[in-house]
Image (cartoon, rainbow, N blue to C red):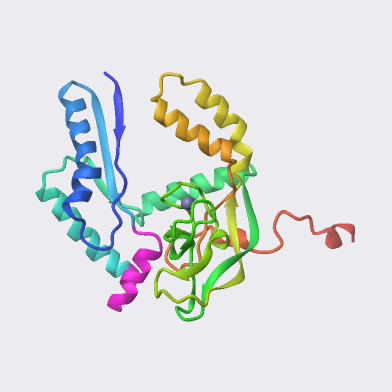
Amino acid sequence: MTKFLITSALPYVNGVKHLGNLAGSLLPADIHARFRRQTGHEVLFLCGTDEHGTPVELAARAEGIPVADYCARQHAIQADIYRRFGLSFDHFSRTSGSANQRLTQEIFQCLDAAGHIEARTIRQAYSPTDARFLPDRYVVGTCPHCGSTNARGDQCETCTRVLDPEDLLSPRSAISGNVDIEFRETRHLFLKLSAFEGDLRRWIASHPEWPLLVRSIALKWLDEGLRDRGITRDLAWGVPGIDRCLAEPRRRPRTGAMAA
Ligand SMILES: [Zn+2]
């Protein structure tokens, strides 16, 4: 008997999902979980609502209620829908739940202790009209590589290139559509992904049995060069206990005090 941990893309908590979400994401995982159980394997089928990110904050703001209340209500609605469709989750949870928060903090602390996290001051898109910083996907514009006019600040869906919002030509706010985008300084934590390139190449090379498409997409990303990835956002709603690492100065020896 083999043990299988199965999940699917986590549905965003905002809005009620349509049948396409169910059929395209949740149902294949459910079918696979049922098949594995019927063939005698031990299966843990996990899923839950993704309750963090700008879409959730904006949806709560539109309704004029606290994000926590909005998430609790929407989670109950979605969990009930999936239950009535008969999806066979062993556990349907929430990313804002205490277990996931502890796990996130633990992963973060491991990465930080190993020196894979770095605090940096960056320039980020700010929309005076929206009165907020616009994270990655909330800036849209023209892709500098392929010319698509609907590229997002984090990635161009047309040519799949990873982008920075400042790469975009003619940037605009995805929230209001306004074009008076400014780039202001803000402090964030980064996962130093670029340091993993060698290990990842060796890992991919050690798995010749993987599907060709999976290997070629992964190698294409490595060939384009891994870029350090921002893992924090200018949002009030998130996993606590990580922002204290943003305090300045960090990991710089306080030479003045030491010398004294
Ligand atoms: Zn593109």
Residue sitting at the far bottom: 129
Quadrant of residue 214 in the image? Answer: top left
> What's the magenta region?
51-67
Q: In this view, does 215 lie to the left or right of 43?
A: right
| Numbered circles on residues, count | 0
As rendered, which of 215 and 65 lies closer to the eye?
215
Quadrant for the N terminus in the image: top left
Residue 183 image offset from top left, x and y in percent: 59, 70
As rendered, which of 74 and 22 lies closer to the eye?
22
Residue 51 image offset from top left, x and y in percent: 34, 59
Q: Is residue 201 left or right of residue 87?
A: right
Q: In this view, does 32 lie to the left or right of 57?
A: left
Quadrant for the C terminus in the image: bottom right
Residue 17 image offset from top left, x and y in percent: 21, 56
Quadrant of residue 53 in the image? Answer: bottom left
Does the magenta run of residues contain 64? yes
- Seen at 28% across and 68% down, the residue is 70
